Amino acid sequence: MNYIKGYRCTICQKEFKPGEVGLTCPHCGEKGILDVIYDYDKLKEVLTKEYFANNRNYSMWRYWPMMGIEETHIDEMLRIGWTPLYHARRLGEYLGVKKLYVKDDGLNPSGSSKDRASGVAVLKAIEAGARTIACSSTGNAASSCACQAAHMGLKAVIFVPKRAPIGKVTQISLYGATLISVDGDYKAAFKLSKAAIDKYGWYNRNAAINPFMVEGKKTVSLEIAEQLGWEVTDWVAISVGDGCTVGGVYKGFAELFKLGLIKKIPKILGVQSTGCCPFVIASKNNEPLKEADENTIADSIAVGIPRNPIKAINAIKNSNGAWIAVPDSDIINSMAILGRLEGVFGEPAGVAAIAGIKKAVEQGIIKKDETVTTIVTGNGLKDPANAQKAINAPVLMKPNLEELDKFLKEKGVI
Ligand SMILES: *Cc1c(COP(=O)(O)O)cnc(C)c1O
Ligand SMILES: [Zn+2]
């Protein structure tokens, strides 16, 4: 059994009972992305602070009653979630905020937040009796879908744009998935995957269509709240591509608020690269979303046509948050700063939110007496080529103590 009461269309707001609809709204078609709604009264009885205090499942599966899944297979799944939340004192001081927490979601099984969604996708595919799961992605959803499918013995067919970094592409094949490297950008990969899924009837993990992906993504907020003793920070900063993650982050906090487990919903800072920032442009000009170039090193958020726009826009609006764009040079700098000050290695999209916090503080959007949590959404080892832009190339040295001595003096080490 699960606690789903039904689904609500994000466009026409019409509600449907379980079993009444497929993945999207029958009236609004493909764009009619659904929200999963629960029997919150029933959840309130079960999900108390005591329930969590006594729950020894240290993974995102501890939240299964509010993830739209059956409990049946959760013990067979990989350990996704319950990633560490660090009080980042040095980085917080550098950014000029009162208190900063860093949630290192790069420590998930395939190295990104996407495992939260892919784990749920694989369970829903099994519930639906599917043998094959498919998705298109800029890289992380792809490698994570391949990873989670492998663990549960499902076939995976994965579409990526040709620019996907080698680390992520390698993961996909290593996990035994069928890899389709599309000669084009993410938009092209998405389109081909959609046509193939329609034709072959595979289970669709595309985050923009499948409402359960947000149910997985939102567990990051549930963890943040619980790890902070149910006292959330004033802000939560996150990078945005399709908008599924930020939509999930908001839904997680909004539901905890509804269940009476937290007293406020954090303001959400949505961060994009200036090289690809359709949400920031639309919000600044107060106009509808327009297609943007995909011109950033932060490949995971190089999304010219966001596929989950309504949930993303509502997340920022309903939380009284803000949108901000940062140049790639700031993103590269954030990789180095996060590594140097906190010992955490994030991929470009994983640290973009840190650059966003810095700019938001400079602009007075985030006040100096406010507390902030940021989510490092992907591991830096996925994309070492871009990480190298943030560091000096290593110096090759003769095995000679005098030379070493000279080098250490130059560097100020001795
Ligand atoms: C996918 C991803 C994001 C953005 O998530 P969206 O749901 O596309 O907005 C951010 N960072 C990383 C590392 C990602 O893989
Ligand atoms: Zn609708």
Image: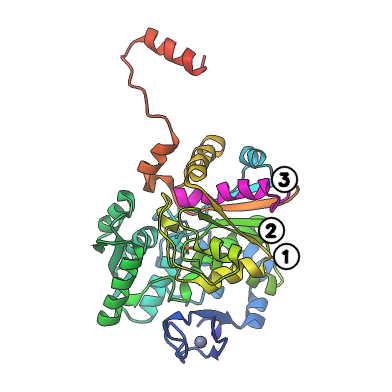
231 displayed left or right of 159: right
Report the span colored magenta.
348-367
Q: Disc 2 residue type?
A: Val
Helix, strand or loop at mark 3: loop
Mark drawn on residue 98:
3
Q: Disc 3 residue type?
A: Lys
Residue 253 visible in the current orientation: no
Say whether disc 1 or disc 2 marks the residue closer to the N-terminus. Answer: 2
Residue that numbered label 2 is attached to: 232
63 displayed left or right of 225: left
> How many labels, in total?
3
Helix, strand or loop at mark 2: loop
Q: Residue at x 52, y 54 (%)?
A: 83
184 displayed left or right of 279: left
**Cβ atoms under marks 3 and 2 closer than 8 Å:** no
Does residue 358 show up magenta in the picture?
A: yes
Residue that numbered label 1 is attached to: 264
Using the numbered discs, state the Cα–Cα distance from disc 1 to disc 2 in whole angstroms: 7 Å
> Where in the figure is residue 246, as x and y percent of width and height?
55, 64
